[in-house]
Amino acid sequence: MTVTEDAPRAPRAQDIPDTPPTPTPPPPLRTRLRVPRALRLDAADRDVLALYLLTRVTLLLIAYCTAWLFPRDPEAHRPDSFAEVVGRWDWDHYLHIARDGYFPDDPAARPEPWDNREAFFPGFPFALRAAHLVVGDWTAAGLLVSLLAGAVAVLALGRVARQHLPETSDSRRAVLLLLVSPCAVFLAVGYTESLFLAFALPAWLAARRDAWRLAALLTAGATTVRVTGLFLLAALVVHFALTARRRGVVRRLPWLAVPALPPLLYVWYLHGRTGDWMAWKHAQERGWYRQFHAPWESWSTTWDAAFGHGHSSAYALLWQAELVAMVVGIAAVALLARARRWPEAVYIALSLWALGTSYWYMSVPRATLLWWPLWVGLAAWTLRAPWRTAVWLFLSAPLAVVLAVTYFSGRWAG
């Protein structure tokens, strides 16, 4: 038996195509930048930014008109400079810290006894100094910090509102209510409110989705800017205690110690320069009468300042605003507690305790800008009846203009 192997068969004519097939080119190599989900802007985010930019233009218009209507020297027949109009009160402290430091070596730059710049946390001056490297003018640098931080803050507020309001479009309402609130001018000038919210609101969003490392780091940024960051930390601790066991993230607990580090380092720094572990508190007491008093004593002193005719009418009016803001804050805490939203209630309650146990109330209306549960809750309240939105806007917007003119004209505005 012979075994033969099959020889290869020659191709036949019908097997050969008329034209050779065109080779398929390999897909092009594309480098696609993957944008993190948190940084992607949807239609609601873009609407929020549009509202934000429009209100910035409005405040610039108010500042321009105020400079012409209320110059420091009416006989000069010219308006105040833009830097003079937007740089008032606490701005001078932040500017001096950013430019000269807390304890300058140059005798000409040393603070006056009334300066008390140790009362201000270093976060905003650090950001101001960094912005000054890009923008040569200090005033422009401060406005740039607040502009960019405010954009982050309103985007985050809109996203917080989406977690509580029925429609995505309704989240814009909370942002609008904040941007036309009576003290909204402080979100635009060189103050700490915008920068604080730019850290605090994303930190709250991160905690809500159990991203505790990110929440801790962002809260550390907030505690670098304001002591109010410690109140945010307390709210996060409460939220962690209520949710961590259920979600299995107890091992993330040590991260919540991180936000306490910036205040501790600042206290340590001040002690090294002054020998006083309580230098920050003592500066607050010297400059703003923040010695501890019982809450009812603080209320009584503020009431006398508002209605006792012992102060000028302009100061008395603003102390009346302090009383109203305190009542609003207490009502907000009560409603949050009733809804069992304990973390947010703790956050506002601690703020009220800090501001409501001084010699008298000071800066409570400004503090309302930082109470994001208030603006989300107010947005939910206005959704129940359309006329409520109109009522709020007709009341709040004129007050916002009045407070902006008060600030830009150099009068005490909170």
Image (spheres, rainbow, N blue to C red):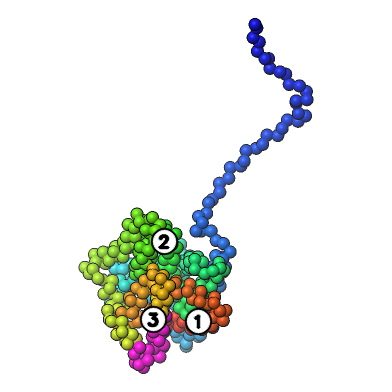
15 w.r.t. 130: above or below: above
Tell me the residue that label 2 is attached to. 207
Relative depth, front residue between 300 and 404: 300
Question: Mark 2 falls on what kind of element?
Answer: helix
Give the amino acid type for the residue marked by disc 1 in the picture. Answer: Ser
| Observer able to see residue 8 | yes
Q: Give the secondary structure at mark 3.
A: helix
Quadrant of residue 219 within the rendered picture: bottom left
Q: Relative to 227, is 29 above or below?
A: above
Q: Residues within 10 Å of mark 1 (few under 14, many from 20)?
A: some
At horizontal 26% and vertical 64% (from top left) the residue drawn is 268
Residue 333 in the image, given as x and y percentages of width and height: 39, 76
Q: Amino acid at mark 2?
A: Ala
Image quadrant assignment for residue 139: bottom left
Give the labeled residue for mark 1.
396
The residue to which callout 3 is attached is 326
Residue located at (26% from left, 71% from top): 279
Residue in the image at 57% along x and 79% along y: 386
Q: Residue 240 versus residue 122: which sits nearer the camera?
A: 240
Query: What stretch of residues is rendered in magenta?
Result: 303-328
Placement of 148 over or under 379, stated as above or below: above
Looking at the image, tell me whether mark 1 or mark 3 is earlier in sequence order.
Answer: 3
